[in-house]
Amino acid sequence: MRNFKRVLVANRGEIAIRIFRACAELGIRTVAIYSNEDKCSLFRTKADESYLIGKNQGPIEAYLSIEEIIDLALKKGVDAIHPGYGFLAENTEFAKKCEEAGIEFIGPNHIMMDKLGDKIKSKIVAKEVGVPTIPGVEKPIKSEQDAKEFAGFCGYPVMLKAAAGGGGRGMRIVTREEDLINEFNSARSEAKKAFGIDDIFIEKYLEKPKHIEVQVIGDKYGNVVHLHERDCSIQRRHQKVIEFTPSLCLTDEQRTAICEDALKIARAVNYRNAGTIEFLVDAHGNHYFIEMNPRIQVEHTVTEMVTGIDLVQTQILVAQGYRLDSPEIGLASQEDIKPRGYAIQCRVTTEDPANNFAPDTGRIDVYRSGSGFGIRLDGAEGFAGSVISPYYDSLLVKVSAQGRDFDDARRKAVRSVKELTVNGIKTNAAFIINVLNHEIFKKGDCDTGFISNNPELLN
Ligand code: ADP
Protein backbone atom coordinates (compact mmCIF):
# COMPACT_ATOMS: atom_id res chain seq x y z
CA MET A 1 0.00 0.00 0.00
CA ARG A 2 1.22 3.43 -0.85
CA ASN A 3 -0.79 6.49 0.09
CA PHE A 4 -0.53 9.14 -2.58
CA LYS A 5 0.02 12.68 -1.35
CA ARG A 6 0.81 14.27 -4.70
CA VAL A 7 -0.25 13.19 -8.16
CA LEU A 8 1.04 14.70 -11.41
CA VAL A 9 -1.20 14.64 -14.45
CA ALA A 10 0.82 14.23 -17.65
CA ASN A 11 -1.93 15.64 -19.84
CA ARG A 12 -3.94 18.76 -20.58
CA GLY A 13 -7.47 19.99 -21.19
CA GLU A 14 -10.65 18.31 -20.02
CA ILE A 15 -9.11 15.02 -18.93
CA ALA A 16 -6.51 16.82 -16.79
CA ILE A 17 -9.33 18.67 -15.01
CA ARG A 18 -11.29 15.43 -14.63
CA ILE A 19 -8.30 13.82 -12.88
CA PHE A 20 -7.57 16.88 -10.69
CA ARG A 21 -11.16 16.72 -9.48
CA ALA A 22 -10.90 13.03 -8.61
CA CYS A 23 -7.66 13.69 -6.70
CA ALA A 24 -9.12 16.68 -4.85
CA GLU A 25 -12.04 14.55 -3.70
CA LEU A 26 -9.59 11.94 -2.42
CA GLY A 27 -7.57 14.59 -0.56
CA ILE A 28 -4.58 14.33 -2.89
CA ARG A 29 -2.55 17.39 -3.97
CA THR A 30 -2.37 17.89 -7.74
CA VAL A 31 0.47 18.91 -10.02
CA ALA A 32 -0.13 20.11 -13.59
CA ILE A 33 2.33 20.40 -16.45
CA TYR A 34 1.76 22.77 -19.36
CA SER A 35 3.41 23.67 -22.64
CA ASN A 36 4.32 27.19 -23.81
CA GLU A 37 1.14 27.19 -25.88
CA ASP A 38 -0.95 26.30 -22.82
CA LYS A 39 0.36 29.13 -20.62
CA CYS A 40 -3.06 30.74 -20.56
CA SER A 41 -5.13 27.55 -20.55
CA LEU A 42 -7.66 27.09 -17.80
CA PHE A 43 -6.78 23.51 -16.93
CA ARG A 44 -3.52 24.37 -15.23
CA THR A 45 -5.22 26.70 -12.79
CA LYS A 46 -7.37 23.80 -11.61
CA ALA A 47 -4.33 22.05 -10.13
CA ASP A 48 -2.68 22.97 -6.84
CA GLU A 49 0.63 23.57 -8.63
CA SER A 50 1.61 23.85 -12.28
CA TYR A 51 4.91 23.81 -14.13
CA LEU A 52 6.04 24.68 -17.63
CA ILE A 53 7.62 21.81 -19.55
CA GLY A 54 9.12 21.46 -23.01
CA LYS A 55 10.23 25.10 -23.12
CA ASN A 56 12.10 24.60 -26.37
CA GLN A 57 9.79 22.04 -27.83
CA GLY A 58 6.65 22.07 -29.91
CA PRO A 59 3.11 22.07 -28.45
CA ILE A 60 2.66 18.30 -28.71
CA GLU A 61 6.28 17.29 -28.03
CA ALA A 62 6.17 19.13 -24.69
CA TYR A 63 3.63 16.61 -23.38
CA LEU A 64 5.75 13.75 -24.71
CA SER A 65 9.02 14.74 -23.02
CA ILE A 66 9.41 11.66 -20.87
CA GLU A 67 12.69 12.55 -19.16
CA GLU A 68 11.64 16.06 -18.28
CA ILE A 69 8.30 14.97 -16.86
CA ILE A 70 9.89 12.28 -14.70
CA ASP A 71 12.62 14.67 -13.50
CA LEU A 72 10.00 17.23 -12.56
CA ALA A 73 7.93 14.60 -10.75
CA LEU A 74 10.97 13.50 -8.74
CA LYS A 75 11.92 17.07 -7.90
CA LYS A 76 8.43 17.88 -6.71
CA GLY A 77 8.04 14.77 -4.59
CA VAL A 78 5.25 13.30 -6.71
CA ASP A 79 4.06 9.80 -5.73
CA ALA A 80 2.20 8.94 -8.92
CA ILE A 81 1.56 10.08 -12.49
CA HIS A 82 -1.80 9.83 -14.22
CA PRO A 83 -1.36 9.90 -18.01
CA GLY A 84 -5.02 10.51 -18.99
CA TYR A 85 -5.67 9.48 -22.62
CA GLY A 86 -3.54 10.22 -25.69
CA PHE A 87 0.01 11.62 -25.32
CA LEU A 88 1.96 9.17 -23.08
CA ALA A 89 -1.01 7.08 -21.91
CA GLU A 90 -0.04 4.03 -23.97
CA ASN A 91 3.71 4.56 -24.03
CA THR A 92 5.39 1.48 -22.52
CA GLU A 93 8.72 3.27 -22.20
CA PHE A 94 7.10 5.97 -20.08
CA ALA A 95 5.30 3.44 -17.87
CA LYS A 96 8.58 1.56 -17.41
CA LYS A 97 10.60 4.68 -16.62
CA CYS A 98 8.03 5.77 -14.03
CA GLU A 99 8.32 2.36 -12.38
CA GLU A 100 12.13 2.56 -12.43
CA ALA A 101 12.04 6.03 -10.87
CA GLY A 102 9.83 4.74 -8.05
CA ILE A 103 6.83 6.72 -9.27
CA GLU A 104 3.54 4.84 -9.55
CA PHE A 105 2.13 4.93 -13.07
CA ILE A 106 -1.66 5.07 -12.76
CA GLY A 107 -2.45 2.38 -15.30
CA PRO A 108 -1.30 -1.15 -16.11
CA ASN A 109 2.39 -2.02 -15.75
CA HIS A 110 4.54 -1.83 -18.86
CA ILE A 111 4.41 -5.58 -19.51
CA MET A 112 0.61 -5.70 -19.61
CA MET A 113 0.58 -2.52 -21.64
CA ASP A 114 2.98 -3.98 -24.15
CA LYS A 115 0.89 -7.13 -24.54
CA LEU A 116 -2.48 -5.45 -24.79
CA GLY A 117 -1.82 -1.94 -26.11
CA ASP A 118 -0.48 -3.23 -29.40
CA LYS A 119 -3.13 -4.05 -31.98
CA ILE A 120 -1.40 -7.20 -33.24
CA LYS A 121 -0.15 -8.63 -29.94
CA SER A 122 -3.50 -8.15 -28.21
CA LYS A 123 -5.27 -10.12 -30.94
CA ILE A 124 -2.92 -13.01 -30.26
CA VAL A 125 -3.82 -12.87 -26.54
CA ALA A 126 -7.53 -12.85 -27.46
CA LYS A 127 -7.14 -15.86 -29.72
CA GLU A 128 -5.24 -17.78 -27.06
CA VAL A 129 -8.15 -17.46 -24.64
CA GLY A 130 -10.70 -18.38 -27.29
CA VAL A 131 -12.17 -14.94 -27.97
CA PRO A 132 -13.18 -14.44 -31.62
CA THR A 133 -11.10 -11.89 -33.53
CA ILE A 134 -11.41 -10.40 -37.01
CA PRO A 135 -9.48 -12.60 -39.45
CA GLY A 136 -6.11 -10.98 -40.03
CA VAL A 137 -2.36 -11.47 -40.14
CA GLU A 138 -0.39 -12.08 -36.96
CA LYS A 139 2.66 -10.08 -37.99
CA PRO A 140 3.18 -6.75 -39.74
CA ILE A 141 3.11 -7.27 -43.49
CA LYS A 142 6.39 -6.54 -45.16
CA SER A 143 5.49 -6.45 -48.82
CA GLU A 144 2.59 -5.83 -51.17
CA GLN A 145 2.82 -9.52 -51.98
CA ASP A 146 1.97 -10.44 -48.36
CA ALA A 147 -0.99 -8.08 -48.47
CA LYS A 148 -2.19 -9.54 -51.75
CA GLU A 149 -1.89 -13.08 -50.48
CA PHE A 150 -3.97 -12.36 -47.39
CA ALA A 151 -6.64 -10.46 -49.33
CA GLY A 152 -6.80 -13.23 -51.90
CA PHE A 153 -7.29 -15.74 -49.13
CA CYS A 154 -9.94 -13.92 -47.05
CA GLY A 155 -11.59 -11.91 -49.86
CA TYR A 156 -12.24 -8.19 -50.32
CA PRO A 157 -12.90 -5.71 -48.76
CA VAL A 158 -9.88 -5.65 -46.46
CA MET A 159 -8.55 -3.05 -44.09
CA LEU A 160 -4.96 -1.87 -43.80
CA LYS A 161 -4.10 -0.60 -40.34
CA ALA A 162 -1.07 1.04 -38.80
CA ALA A 163 0.03 -1.16 -35.89
CA ALA A 164 0.77 1.97 -33.88
CA GLY A 165 -2.38 3.76 -35.03
CA GLY A 166 -5.00 5.35 -32.85
CA GLY A 167 -7.81 7.87 -32.83
CA GLY A 168 -9.25 6.44 -36.01
CA ARG A 169 -6.16 7.37 -37.99
CA GLY A 170 -3.93 5.17 -40.10
CA MET A 171 -6.69 2.98 -41.55
CA ARG A 172 -7.54 2.29 -45.18
CA ILE A 173 -10.28 0.22 -46.72
CA VAL A 174 -9.40 -1.61 -49.92
CA THR A 175 -12.23 -2.99 -52.01
CA ARG A 176 -10.40 -4.07 -55.18
CA GLU A 177 -7.15 -5.91 -55.77
CA GLU A 178 -5.94 -3.28 -58.27
CA ASP A 179 -5.90 -0.65 -55.49
CA LEU A 180 -4.05 -2.75 -52.96
CA ILE A 181 -0.46 -1.91 -53.88
CA ASN A 182 -1.04 1.83 -53.96
CA GLU A 183 -2.98 1.80 -50.72
CA PHE A 184 -0.37 -0.35 -49.01
CA ASN A 185 2.43 2.04 -49.97
CA SER A 186 0.51 5.15 -48.93
CA ALA A 187 -0.60 3.51 -45.66
CA ARG A 188 3.00 2.76 -44.88
CA SER A 189 4.36 6.22 -45.51
CA GLU A 190 1.38 7.77 -43.72
CA ALA A 191 1.98 5.56 -40.67
CA LYS A 192 5.66 6.47 -40.63
CA LYS A 193 4.80 10.16 -40.69
CA ALA A 194 2.02 10.03 -38.12
CA PHE A 195 3.30 7.42 -35.66
CA GLY A 196 7.02 7.07 -36.44
CA ILE A 197 6.60 3.36 -37.18
CA ASP A 198 5.60 2.01 -40.58
CA ASP A 199 4.36 -1.39 -39.41
CA ILE A 200 1.14 -2.16 -41.24
CA PHE A 201 -1.15 -5.10 -40.81
CA ILE A 202 -4.14 -6.28 -42.72
CA GLU A 203 -7.47 -7.72 -41.67
CA LYS A 204 -10.89 -8.46 -43.10
CA TYR A 205 -13.07 -5.35 -43.34
CA LEU A 206 -16.40 -5.92 -41.66
CA GLU A 207 -19.25 -4.09 -43.38
CA LYS A 208 -21.66 -2.01 -41.30
CA PRO A 209 -20.69 -3.34 -37.89
CA LYS A 210 -21.53 -1.86 -34.53
CA HIS A 211 -18.72 -0.84 -32.20
CA ILE A 212 -19.33 -2.25 -28.73
CA GLU A 213 -16.73 -1.94 -26.01
CA VAL A 214 -16.50 -3.22 -22.47
CA GLN A 215 -15.08 -1.27 -19.54
CA VAL A 216 -12.97 -3.34 -17.17
CA ILE A 217 -11.06 -2.54 -14.01
CA GLY A 218 -8.64 -4.69 -12.05
CA ASP A 219 -6.68 -4.39 -8.84
CA LYS A 220 -3.11 -5.48 -8.11
CA TYR A 221 -4.20 -8.88 -6.75
CA GLY A 222 -5.70 -10.39 -9.87
CA ASN A 223 -9.29 -9.32 -9.26
CA VAL A 224 -11.04 -7.85 -12.26
CA VAL A 225 -14.62 -6.84 -12.99
CA HIS A 226 -16.40 -5.34 -15.96
CA LEU A 227 -18.58 -2.25 -15.85
CA HIS A 228 -20.73 -3.34 -18.79
CA GLU A 229 -20.64 -2.12 -22.35
CA ARG A 230 -20.82 1.10 -24.34
CA ASP A 231 -22.10 1.48 -27.88
CA CYS A 232 -19.69 3.75 -29.79
CA SER A 233 -20.96 3.12 -33.32
CA ILE A 234 -21.70 6.76 -34.13
CA GLN A 235 -18.40 7.64 -35.73
CA ARG A 236 -17.02 10.00 -38.32
CA ARG A 237 -13.97 8.68 -40.16
CA HIS A 238 -13.57 5.93 -37.54
CA GLN A 239 -13.61 8.48 -34.72
CA LYS A 240 -16.30 8.36 -32.07
CA VAL A 241 -18.80 11.23 -31.96
CA ILE A 242 -21.59 9.99 -29.66
CA GLU A 243 -21.45 7.07 -27.23
CA PHE A 244 -24.08 5.52 -25.01
CA THR A 245 -24.77 2.76 -22.56
CA PRO A 246 -26.33 0.23 -22.37
CA SER A 247 -26.42 -0.85 -26.00
CA LEU A 248 -29.85 -1.27 -27.54
CA CYS A 249 -28.80 -3.84 -30.11
CA LEU A 250 -27.67 -6.73 -27.90
CA THR A 251 -29.79 -9.50 -26.44
CA ASP A 252 -29.09 -10.40 -22.82
CA GLU A 253 -27.19 -13.50 -24.00
CA GLN A 254 -25.06 -11.46 -26.40
CA ARG A 255 -24.35 -8.85 -23.73
CA THR A 256 -23.25 -11.50 -21.23
CA ALA A 257 -21.08 -13.24 -23.83
CA ILE A 258 -19.29 -10.06 -24.87
CA CYS A 259 -18.64 -8.95 -21.28
CA GLU A 260 -17.39 -12.44 -20.37
CA ASP A 261 -15.03 -12.39 -23.36
CA ALA A 262 -13.68 -9.00 -22.27
CA LEU A 263 -12.95 -10.45 -18.83
CA LYS A 264 -11.19 -13.45 -20.39
CA ILE A 265 -8.76 -11.11 -22.16
CA ALA A 266 -8.19 -8.97 -19.06
CA ARG A 267 -7.63 -12.05 -16.90
CA ALA A 268 -5.19 -13.54 -19.40
CA VAL A 269 -2.65 -10.88 -18.45
CA ASN A 270 -3.81 -10.27 -14.88
CA TYR A 271 -4.86 -6.86 -16.05
CA ARG A 272 -4.85 -4.09 -13.52
CA ASN A 273 -6.30 -0.59 -13.52
CA ALA A 274 -8.91 0.66 -16.02
CA GLY A 275 -9.05 -0.61 -19.56
CA THR A 276 -11.44 -0.99 -22.45
CA ILE A 277 -11.83 -4.03 -24.64
CA GLU A 278 -13.25 -3.10 -28.04
CA PHE A 279 -15.31 -5.34 -30.32
CA LEU A 280 -17.10 -5.06 -33.62
CA VAL A 281 -20.50 -6.74 -33.79
CA ASP A 282 -21.87 -7.88 -37.14
CA ALA A 283 -25.48 -7.89 -38.32
CA HIS A 284 -25.98 -11.41 -36.90
CA GLY A 285 -24.87 -10.34 -33.42
CA ASN A 286 -21.47 -12.06 -33.62
CA HIS A 287 -18.73 -10.13 -31.89
CA TYR A 288 -15.06 -9.90 -32.77
CA PHE A 289 -12.30 -8.39 -30.64
CA ILE A 290 -10.47 -5.51 -32.36
CA GLU A 291 -8.29 -3.85 -29.77
CA MET A 292 -7.69 -3.03 -26.13
CA ASN A 293 -7.14 0.46 -24.78
CA PRO A 294 -5.11 0.20 -21.58
CA ARG A 295 -6.17 3.58 -20.18
CA ILE A 296 -9.14 5.75 -19.27
CA GLN A 297 -11.24 6.68 -22.30
CA VAL A 298 -12.99 9.87 -23.37
CA GLU A 299 -16.39 8.18 -23.04
CA HIS A 300 -15.90 6.82 -19.51
CA THR A 301 -18.49 9.39 -18.32
CA VAL A 302 -21.50 7.37 -19.49
CA THR A 303 -20.35 4.29 -17.58
CA GLU A 304 -19.89 6.40 -14.46
CA MET A 305 -23.38 7.84 -14.83
CA VAL A 306 -25.20 4.52 -15.02
CA THR A 307 -23.05 2.58 -12.53
CA GLY A 308 -22.45 5.38 -10.00
CA ILE A 309 -18.80 4.30 -9.88
CA ASP A 310 -16.12 6.98 -10.16
CA LEU A 311 -13.71 5.32 -12.57
CA VAL A 312 -10.89 7.82 -12.16
CA GLN A 313 -10.99 7.61 -8.37
CA THR A 314 -11.04 3.82 -8.65
CA GLN A 315 -7.98 3.99 -10.91
CA ILE A 316 -6.15 6.04 -8.27
CA LEU A 317 -7.24 3.76 -5.44
CA VAL A 318 -6.15 0.54 -7.15
CA ALA A 319 -2.83 2.17 -8.05
CA GLN A 320 -2.34 2.86 -4.32
CA GLY A 321 -2.86 -0.82 -3.67
CA TYR A 322 -6.50 -0.96 -2.58
CA ARG A 323 -8.35 -4.16 -3.40
CA LEU A 324 -11.53 -4.01 -5.45
CA ASP A 325 -13.39 -5.46 -2.44
CA SER A 326 -11.97 -2.91 0.02
CA PRO A 327 -14.51 -0.59 1.68
CA GLU A 328 -12.92 2.34 -0.17
CA ILE A 329 -13.78 0.81 -3.56
CA GLY A 330 -16.65 -1.49 -2.63
CA LEU A 331 -16.63 -3.84 -5.61
CA ALA A 332 -16.60 -7.21 -3.89
CA SER A 333 -18.21 -8.98 -6.82
CA GLN A 334 -19.54 -8.50 -10.31
CA GLU A 335 -23.07 -8.40 -8.84
CA ASP A 336 -22.17 -5.14 -7.04
CA ILE A 337 -22.24 -3.39 -10.39
CA LYS A 338 -25.82 -2.67 -11.38
CA PRO A 339 -26.27 -0.11 -14.13
CA ARG A 340 -29.33 2.08 -13.78
CA GLY A 341 -31.00 3.83 -16.71
CA TYR A 342 -29.25 5.07 -19.82
CA ALA A 343 -26.53 7.62 -20.52
CA ILE A 344 -25.40 9.29 -23.75
CA GLN A 345 -22.27 11.35 -24.31
CA CYS A 346 -21.91 13.87 -27.16
CA ARG A 347 -18.54 15.24 -28.15
CA VAL A 348 -19.06 18.93 -28.95
CA THR A 349 -16.02 20.08 -30.92
CA THR A 350 -14.77 23.35 -32.39
CA GLU A 351 -15.15 21.98 -35.89
CA ASP A 352 -17.12 23.39 -38.78
CA PRO A 353 -19.42 20.76 -40.31
CA ALA A 354 -20.06 23.06 -43.30
CA ASN A 355 -16.33 23.04 -44.07
CA ASN A 356 -15.70 19.30 -43.88
CA PHE A 357 -15.30 19.52 -40.09
CA ALA A 358 -12.17 21.69 -40.34
CA PRO A 359 -11.07 22.80 -36.86
CA ASP A 360 -11.96 26.43 -36.13
CA THR A 361 -9.69 28.58 -33.97
CA GLY A 362 -9.87 31.93 -32.25
CA ARG A 363 -11.58 33.59 -29.31
CA ILE A 364 -14.90 32.57 -27.79
CA ASP A 365 -16.91 35.76 -27.18
CA VAL A 366 -20.02 34.27 -25.61
CA TYR A 367 -20.36 30.89 -23.91
CA ARG A 368 -23.45 29.58 -22.19
CA SER A 369 -23.84 25.90 -21.44
CA GLY A 370 -26.97 23.88 -20.80
CA SER A 371 -26.64 22.16 -17.44
CA GLY A 372 -29.59 20.98 -15.34
CA PHE A 373 -31.02 17.70 -14.08
CA GLY A 374 -29.36 14.65 -15.63
CA ILE A 375 -26.61 16.57 -17.42
CA ARG A 376 -22.89 16.34 -16.84
CA LEU A 377 -20.45 18.67 -18.62
CA ASP A 378 -16.72 17.93 -18.93
CA GLY A 379 -14.62 20.54 -20.68
CA ALA A 380 -11.71 22.92 -20.28
CA GLU A 381 -12.03 25.61 -22.89
CA GLY A 382 -15.69 26.58 -22.76
CA PHE A 383 -15.89 30.12 -21.37
CA ALA A 384 -16.06 33.67 -22.73
CA GLY A 385 -12.56 34.92 -23.49
CA SER A 386 -11.17 31.43 -24.05
CA VAL A 387 -8.80 31.17 -27.00
CA ILE A 388 -8.98 27.96 -29.02
CA SER A 389 -5.54 27.26 -30.45
CA PRO A 390 -4.80 25.16 -33.51
CA TYR A 391 -2.36 22.93 -31.64
CA TYR A 392 -4.54 20.40 -29.87
CA ASP A 393 -7.60 18.21 -30.13
CA SER A 394 -10.75 20.16 -30.98
CA LEU A 395 -12.92 18.73 -28.16
CA LEU A 396 -14.76 21.68 -26.54
CA VAL A 397 -17.17 20.02 -24.11
CA LYS A 398 -18.49 16.54 -23.49
CA VAL A 399 -22.21 16.75 -22.89
CA SER A 400 -23.39 13.63 -21.06
CA ALA A 401 -27.05 13.03 -20.33
CA GLN A 402 -28.64 10.44 -18.09
CA GLY A 403 -32.23 9.30 -18.18
CA ARG A 404 -34.47 6.49 -16.97
CA ASP A 405 -34.67 5.09 -20.50
CA PHE A 406 -32.84 5.75 -23.76
CA ASP A 407 -35.31 8.31 -25.04
CA ASP A 408 -35.30 10.22 -21.77
CA ALA A 409 -31.49 10.46 -21.92
CA ARG A 410 -31.68 11.41 -25.62
CA ARG A 411 -34.18 14.21 -25.01
CA LYS A 412 -32.05 15.58 -22.17
CA ALA A 413 -28.99 15.55 -24.46
CA VAL A 414 -30.91 17.40 -27.18
CA ARG A 415 -32.16 19.96 -24.67
CA SER A 416 -28.65 20.56 -23.29
CA VAL A 417 -26.89 20.85 -26.66
CA LYS A 418 -29.66 23.19 -27.88
CA GLU A 419 -29.10 25.41 -24.85
CA LEU A 420 -25.40 25.65 -25.58
CA THR A 421 -24.52 29.06 -27.02
CA VAL A 422 -21.05 29.61 -28.41
CA ASN A 423 -20.29 32.83 -30.28
CA GLY A 424 -16.98 33.66 -31.94
CA ILE A 425 -16.12 30.14 -32.98
CA LYS A 426 -17.85 27.42 -34.95
CA THR A 427 -18.91 24.16 -33.34
CA ASN A 428 -20.53 20.90 -34.45
CA ALA A 429 -23.49 21.41 -32.05
CA ALA A 430 -26.17 21.60 -34.78
CA PHE A 431 -24.79 18.44 -36.37
CA ILE A 432 -24.93 16.64 -33.00
CA ILE A 433 -28.59 17.64 -32.61
CA ASN A 434 -29.35 16.28 -36.09
CA VAL A 435 -27.82 12.94 -35.11
CA LEU A 436 -29.70 12.81 -31.80
CA ASN A 437 -32.98 13.50 -33.58
CA HIS A 438 -32.47 11.00 -36.41
CA GLU A 439 -34.96 8.12 -36.53
CA ILE A 440 -32.21 5.47 -36.65
CA PHE A 441 -30.45 7.02 -33.66
CA LYS A 442 -33.73 7.14 -31.75
CA LYS A 443 -33.90 3.35 -32.08
CA GLY A 444 -30.26 3.09 -30.96
CA ASP A 445 -29.59 1.19 -34.15
CA CYS A 446 -26.75 3.09 -35.87
CA ASP A 447 -23.83 1.15 -37.35
CA THR A 448 -20.37 2.64 -37.89
CA GLY A 449 -21.36 3.81 -41.39
CA PHE A 450 -24.35 5.83 -40.13
CA ILE A 451 -22.83 9.31 -40.45
CA SER A 452 -21.23 8.76 -43.86
CA ASN A 453 -24.40 7.15 -45.20
CA ASN A 454 -26.67 10.00 -44.06
CA PRO A 455 -25.29 13.22 -45.57
CA GLU A 456 -28.52 15.05 -44.65
CA LEU A 457 -27.17 15.18 -41.07
CA LEU A 458 -25.02 18.10 -42.26
CA ASN A 459 -28.03 20.29 -43.05
P1 ADP B 1 -8.27 3.31 -33.28
O1 ADP B 1 -7.26 2.71 -32.38
O2 ADP B 1 -7.68 4.25 -34.27
O3 ADP B 1 -9.46 3.89 -32.56
P2 ADP B 1 -9.74 0.87 -33.86
O4 ADP B 1 -9.04 -0.37 -34.22
O5 ADP B 1 -10.28 0.99 -32.47
O6 ADP B 1 -8.81 2.11 -34.18
O7 ADP B 1 -10.94 1.09 -34.87
C1 ADP B 1 -11.69 2.29 -34.89
C2 ADP B 1 -12.90 2.10 -35.76
O8 ADP B 1 -12.52 1.74 -37.09
C3 ADP B 1 -13.83 0.99 -35.33
O9 ADP B 1 -14.73 1.38 -34.34
C4 ADP B 1 -14.55 0.68 -36.64
O10 ADP B 1 -15.54 1.63 -36.93
C5 ADP B 1 -13.45 0.82 -37.64
N1 ADP B 1 -12.79 -0.48 -37.88
C6 ADP B 1 -11.64 -0.94 -37.33
N2 ADP B 1 -11.33 -2.16 -37.80
C7 ADP B 1 -12.33 -2.52 -38.65
C8 ADP B 1 -12.61 -3.67 -39.44
N3 ADP B 1 -11.78 -4.71 -39.50
N4 ADP B 1 -13.74 -3.68 -40.18
C9 ADP B 1 -14.58 -2.63 -40.16
N5 ADP B 1 -14.38 -1.51 -39.45
C10 ADP B 1 -13.26 -1.44 -38.69
Image: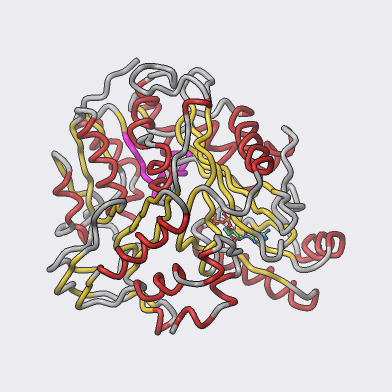
Classify the position of ligand 1 by quadrant: top left, top right, bottom left or bottom right.
Answer: bottom right
Query: Is residue 67 toward the left or the right of residue 371 in the image?
Result: right
Q: Which segment is the magenta one?
A: 81-93
Q: Which of the two residues, 400 or 205, is positioned nearer the viewer here?
A: 400
- The answer to whether 388 is drawn above or below residue 231 in the figure is below
Query: Is residue 441 toward the left or the right of residue 63 in the image?
Result: right
| Residue 451 sits inside the magenta stretch | no
Query: What colour-coding does the image apply?
Result: secondary structure
Q: Which of the two residues, 296 or 52, is positioned nearer the viewer here?
A: 296
Give the residue displayed 57% in from the left and 70% down from the top. Answer: 450
User: Can you tell which quarter of the image residue 79 is in?
Assistant: top left
On the rendered image, what quadrant is the C terminus found in? bottom left
Give the residue displayed 51% in from the left and 65% down from the top. Answer: 442
Magenta region, mostly helix, strand or loop?
loop
| Residue 90 sits inside the magenta stretch | yes
Residue 215 percent coordinates (x, y): 51, 40
Residue 198 percent coordinates (x, y): 60, 59
Q: Is residue 38 visible?
A: yes
User: Can you tell which quarter of the image residue 443 is in?
Assistant: bottom right
Q: Which of the two residues, 245 or 157, is positioned nearer the viewer here?
A: 245
Residue 82 percent coordinates (x, y): 33, 38
Query: Is residue 143 toward the left or the right of residue 152 in the image?
Result: left
Q: Is residue 169 visible?
A: no
On the rendered image, what quadrant is the N terminus found in? top left
Q: Which of the two residues, 430 or 321, is positioned nearer the viewer here?
A: 430
Give the residue displayed 31% in from the left and 66% down from the top. Answer: 417
Residue 160 percent coordinates (x, y): 67, 63
Give the residue displayed 58% in from the left and 64% down from the top. Answer: 446
- The answer to whether 197 is drawn above or below residue 338 in the figure is below
User: Can you tell which quarter of the image residue 116 is in?
Assistant: top right
Q: Residue furthest right?
A: 153
